[in-house]
Amino acid sequence: MRPAISSPLGARQTVGVVWASNVNIDARLHNRMKDVELKLEYPPLAPELRKFVEWVSDYTLSPRGMVLRMCLRMGDLGPAREKVGVRTAGPPPKRMTAARARVLQLLADGMLRTKSEAAQEAGVSAGVVNGLIDEGALETLALPPEPVARQPDPDHDVPEFTDAQRQAADALRATVANSGFSATLVDGVTGSGKTEVYFEAVAEAIRRNRQVLILMPEIALTAQFLDRFAARFGVRPAEWHSELAPRKRARTWFAVAADEVAVVVGARSALFLPYADLGLIVVDEEHDPAYKQEDGVRYHARDMAVVRARENKIPIVLASATPSVETVVNARRGRYAHLRLPERFGGQHLPSVEAIDLRREGPPRGRFISPRLAEAVKIALERGEQALLFLNRRGFAPLTLCSACGHRMACPNCDAWLVDHRFRRRLVCHHCGYAMPLPEQCPKCEAKGSFVAVGPGVERLEQEAAELFPGARILVLSSDLVDSMERLRQELDDVAEGRFDIVIGTQLVAKGHHFPKLNLVGIVDADLGLANGDPRAAERTFQMLHQVVGRAGREVGRGYGYLQTHQPEHPVMRALIAQDREAFYAAEIEVREKAGYPPFGRLASLLVSGADRHATEAHARRIAAVSPIHDHVRVLGPSEAPLAVVRGRHRFRLLVKSPRNFDLSTYLREWLAVAPKSTGTLKLEVDVDPQSFF
């Protein structure tokens, strides 16, 4: 399969792809075919990758070209800037100086150096080197480009393992050695050394000269992971994510296709790279919702990674301290091997977790940190330890209202309140990006200075912490405050080095970071994730809070976690406090099985949106009316989506529910073939296995 620039399609040229050969060509059509203008020199895509593209296209109901486009997003090579090296060539110059002599002595070893390197090492100016080139004493040669990533050494720094780690590592090495498709869950408590264990599978694949893909939920936040990889293997791996410069992206794409890269660490799109000899896939933090692509081709990278491993007949490793319910069920039913790491590395204890019942010991009016949590933070600071206050809500306050008439500041384009961002001095919609300054007077009653902030965000929490703990060095970690990945990585390093006393963060801090001095975690609003109708709300809340509390006590001292909650009797809170993960999974699996929700049933979402509410609802009803009748399929709706308006578009959702083994993709394809087409501003989006219901 080779891409090529085709002949004009109408008035334009476009890139086409030769997908398969056809030996039975109708000669009568030959004169009607356009000539190919130019063949682009891209490496052919392997049959396994083409089959994977077709599978994803068929499963997600996405056009094959859209899926293939993800495989060909290699950036733009452009004219690369050529690096030039110098070395000795002809006879010495007629006029010899001390500076020239130092340059010639340096280059006598025959090694190529750039002009700047030669000048710096010899302690001369660049003009001295240029003069020697002009006189023929030195010659210039083009230097080969730097490799995208150097070859990792599988034996560079093999760690000492506990018995449980060694058993898991041996099992993973055997899995890679045996080759063939298999799926393994590495299930370990926070701080148990899961990464070091699956690194042994990576090392075994490198020894066998096979390529490895390590998927991360958010590659831009994994500087610590890249450092750990370099410590284990001596070099950093190749990276693949949206922040790569176009030229680096292109070089990485071609290096992967040419088998010049051994290990790729990437975000979900790395799954579609044209690996020359892929031998292992690792999905780190496999439970993370960021693996779901919510626009374009709607796919779940974890699930599609299992499919790609199956198509390539290679092993896949899924790692998490809080596995998804789907993965737990697969492990319990024997579809996946299950390796457990029940203890923290180095003998550290898991954090002690307590609930703070806000109904009985809540904070004073206008405050959000309870007295007991404030006292715990104070004690931690006196010990020279760090504290983390977690609130998964960006900005200063989620709602701004007029105290005179009750008017709430809402987004004009979405069915959502505007969030107060004091650092930016703006009211912002988190759904469409609309922003405005806080008005001087209420647009409804025209009262001046009457606006009040309702509820806390991380910015408001910082203000309160500064008043409660004067002199403490406080850092707010929130995605809307990150102006560059470099700054974020530096701030994470600063926390790890102890340059801040209190960290106030959103889910950004729950992504597997290691902060040696952090021994106290306070969850300011543990109920926040439970306050919606998402079928996965309990699971996601448990996973996030478990991961956040797991940041405490990972290296020195005892870790403590405090959950501020209005419902300490909730199953999620009880499981977190008792540290009884199995009880939570048992209860959640029972609820899912009774309701027929994934993984015991299947769901698909059909979201109809449009500029006019009545036309959108009518179109959704026409689509529902022609749904095929099937004994095992239920079509629910259409009903208004929880976020009824986004970016000025009204939204109505149909939800399709079927048994687990039902071919839902085929059912949807047959339905949409007879459904009325979306015209004008109307749009239909299909999401098989939806993760979001807003």
Image (cartoon, grey):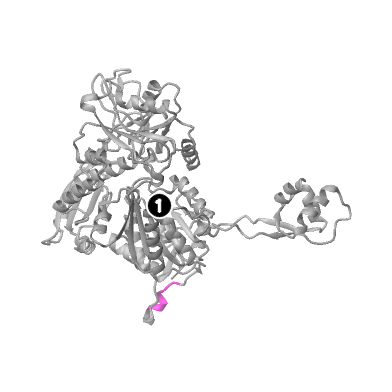
Farthest-out residue, right: 94
In the picture, the quarter occupied by the N terminus is bottom left
The image shows residue 304, relative to residue 694, as above or below, that is: below
Image x and y of residue 264, in percent? 46, 57
Say what secondary structure mark 1 lies in: loop
Q: Amino acid at mark 1?
A: Thr
Q: Which residues are magenta?
A: 29-34
Residue drawn at x 87%, y 52% as measured from the top left: 96
Residue 14 on the magenta segment: no
- Residue 386: % across, % down: 42, 32
User: Residue 75's spot in the image, x, y percent?
Assistant: 49, 56
The residue depicted at 44 percent of the width and 68 percent of the height is: 45
The quadrant holding residue 461 is top left
Q: Would residue 293 be visible to someone looking at this image?
A: no
Out of 436 and 331, give the one closest to the viewer: 331
Q: Residue at x 40, y 41 (%)?
A: 554
Magenta span contains residue 32? yes
Residue for badge 1:
162
Image side of residue 187 versus residue 133, left or right: left
Residue at 81% x, 58% y is: 137
Instruction: Please name the predominant secondary structure of the magenta segment in the image.
Output: helix
228 displayed left or right of 533: right
Does the image show residue 34?
A: yes
